[in-house]
């Protein structure tokens, strides 16, 4: 019997909208927040922010509290606010919001645990690059900024896999694409003309 993640990797996970980026402060969370805000009134959405831990990654991910001692840790955000991305997602209308820290090699195991926390057909908006190596989402966008150095070297390889690449934090451009996003029986889709 295959695991949930193996099943999801074999059959594309259309209920996942994945947001990645080439560095910090390029607009990943802003895009996710805007997407959740538009669709949460008519659809229950779960938000997930993943910090994939590799040696020397502090500059890329910032400081996320105590040192990770186990293979992964999943925390549900219970308080809405504007001081953390997971809290912003709740303010935008996410039904639930989670923060996951995982060592790279533990991400499949971490996602297995996460899928046990939510309904399998739940619409999911996740902020992560590495998750794209394990799951084919219904939609995948990457945000980059030509004026900033690329913090996440592995992100370069993902640019060609994205449905859309934004070259800067541009809320008008974000909104244009979000206006072309729809939710059908199979999950998230992006209007082809906007790709």
Image (cartoon, rainbow, N blue to C red):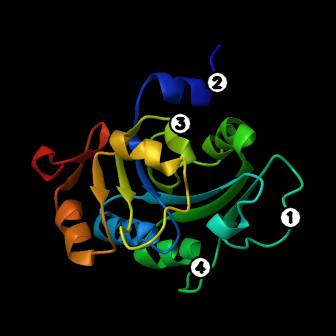
The mark that comes first in sequence, 3 or 2, is: 2
Q: Label 3, on which residue?
A: 133
Q: Residues within 10 Å of mark 3 (few under 14, many from 20)?
A: few
CA gap, disc 1 to disc 2? 29 Å
- Residue at label 2? 3
Q: Residue 116, can we see it?
A: yes
Asked if marks 4 and 3 touch (Cβ < 8 Å), the reply is: no
Residue depicted at 43% across the width and 58% down the height: 45
- Indicate which disc, 1 or 2, sits on the residue closer to the N terminus: 2
State the CA–CA distance, disc 2 to disc 4: 32 Å
Whole-percent x, y for residue 154 in the image:
54, 47
Sequence order check: which comes first, mark 4 or mark 1? 1
Residue annotated with mark 4: 84
Q: What residue is pinned by disc 1?
A: 67
Nearest to N terminus: mark 1 or mark 3: 1
Using a 10 Å C-alpha cutoff, classify the residue at mark 4 as few (fewer than 14 neighbours), some (14 to 19) or many (20 or more): few
At x 42%, y 56%, the residue is 19
- Answer with the quarter of the image where residue 31 lies: bottom left
Residue 110: x percent and y percent? 70, 43
Above or below, 93 against 117 in this view is below
Answer with mark 4 or mark 3, whichever residue precedes in sequence: 4
Does label 2 or label 4 sit earlier along the sequence? 2
Q: CA distance from mark 4 to mark 3?
A: 26 Å
Badge 1 local density, few (<14 within 10 Å), some, or many (20+)?
few
Q: Which mark is residue 112?
A: none
Question: Foreground residue, 119 or 66?
Answer: 66
Q: Quadrant of the N terminus?
A: top right
Image coordinates for residue 192, horizontal then vertical, percent:
14, 44
> Dividing the picture into quarters, in which one does residue 64 lie?
bottom right
């Amino acid at each position: 019997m295959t695991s949930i993640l193996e099943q999801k990797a074999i059959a594309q996970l259309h209920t996942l909208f994945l947001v990645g980026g080439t560095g910090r402060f390029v607009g990943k969370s802003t895009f996710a927040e805007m997407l959740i805000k538009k669709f949460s009134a008519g659809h229950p959405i779960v938000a997930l922010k993943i910090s994939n831990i590799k040696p020397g990654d502090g500059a890329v991910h910032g400081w996320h509290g105590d040192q990770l001692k186990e293979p992964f840790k999943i925390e549900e955000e219970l308080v809405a606010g504007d001081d953390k991305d997971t809290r912003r997602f709740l303010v935008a209308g996410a039904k639930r919001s989670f923060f996951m820290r995982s060592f790279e090699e533990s991400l499949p195991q971490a996602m297995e645990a996460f899928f046990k926390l939510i309904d399998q057909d739940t619409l999911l908006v996740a902020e992560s690059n590495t998750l794209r190596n394990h799951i084919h989402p219904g939609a995948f966008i990457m945000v980059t900024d030509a004026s900033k150095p690329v913090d996440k070297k592995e992100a370069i390889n993902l640019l060609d896999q994205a449905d859309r690449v934004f070259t800067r934090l541009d809320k008008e451009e974000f909104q244009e694409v979000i206006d072309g996003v729809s939710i059908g029986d199979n999950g998230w889709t992006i209007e082809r003309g906007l790709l």
